[in-house]
Amino acid sequence: MEHINWYPGHMKKTRELIQENLKMVDIVIEVVDARIPVSSRNPIIDELIKSKDRIIVLNKSDLSDNRANEAWVEFFKKQGHDVLPMNCMSGYGVPQFLKLLTSIQEKKNEGKVRKKPLRMMIVGVPNVGKSSLINRLTGKKSAKTGNKPGVTRGKQWLNLENDMQLLDTPGILWPKFEDPKAGLNLAFCGSIKDEILDVATLALELIGVLQSDYPDLLKERYKLEDLGETPLETMERIAEKRGFIQSGKRIDYERTGRTVLDEFRAGTIGKITLEKS
């Protein structure tokens, strides 16, 4: 897993796009996955944005641990950022987000005769929910959405109903993951295309994390009396419970792995945060 290296050409262009347009915006909206608030923050974004004002959106907060959400809000606030837990698909947190933007715009235009629209840039790694947030802000499907990373393409200036303007950018990852755990966390949450990873192996890694941090949720979801001594044993018990057995009583690791990954990503295993502040 430590050799994950995924940097399509459009991501290089995105970096250049951010650099070129940063001076045109007043504030940057960084969307991160609330389940992995560190791994889903691209260090290149920090390098590019530097001292520009920023709002951090903890998206998919409905899928993450509530206590962990509260802790991450406090963590980012201490760094000087505005931060909001949101669910951009359902609209949770959108009214508070709009209220915050209005407050920032009013402060920007305070005492000025000619009022200027607040101009924003939205950034984040693939599949964290940027397009869903944009569609909520514009009230229409301005941006393509999909459960596969890399759907958004090119540069789009979008006009919001409150006279604000938003620059969307495609998702951007970094050339190589220095921390193997960050690559795994992104893969668990679907920010790296499954096609480039072995699904069964990835799911086995995830089961190991859940067995350590959320054993009760794992037992409850898959109706297991006990977990195995190893993640592999637990995976095999899940397969047996679900009937994922091939001819010759062989475990269908691929199907089991796909099921565990899908159910984790959908939140059906439970509210889980893989990184604690």
Image (tube, helix red, strand yellow):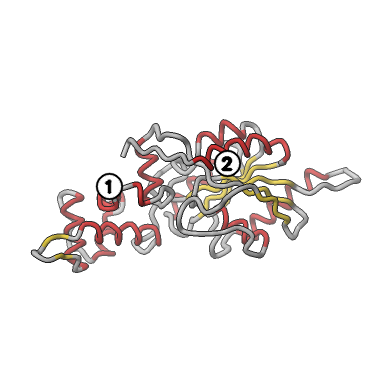
**Residue type at tag 2:** Lys
Mark 1 and mark 2: Cα distance apart in space: 32 Å
- Amino acid type, label 1: Glu
Residue 57 percent location from the top left of the image: 56, 49
Question: Which residue is located at x 39 percent, y 32 percent?
Answer: 178
Q: Is residue 101 left or right of residue 82?
A: right
Q: 92 above or below 149?
A: below
Query: Residue 120 or 144: which is nearer the viewer?
Result: 144
Q: Which of 164 and 54 is in front in this view?
A: 164
Outermost residue toward the left in this view: 248
> In which quarter of the view is residue 161 placed?
bottom right
Which quadrant of the structure image shows residue 51? top right
- At a point 89% along the width and 46% down the height, the residue shown is 114
Closer to us: 69 or 189: 189
**Residue 62: x and y, percent?**
47, 59
Q: Mark 2 points at which residue?
A: 77
Identify the residue position indicated by label 1 in the image.
205
Numbered disc 1: secondary structure? helix
Q: Point out the image quarter for the C terminus.
A: top left
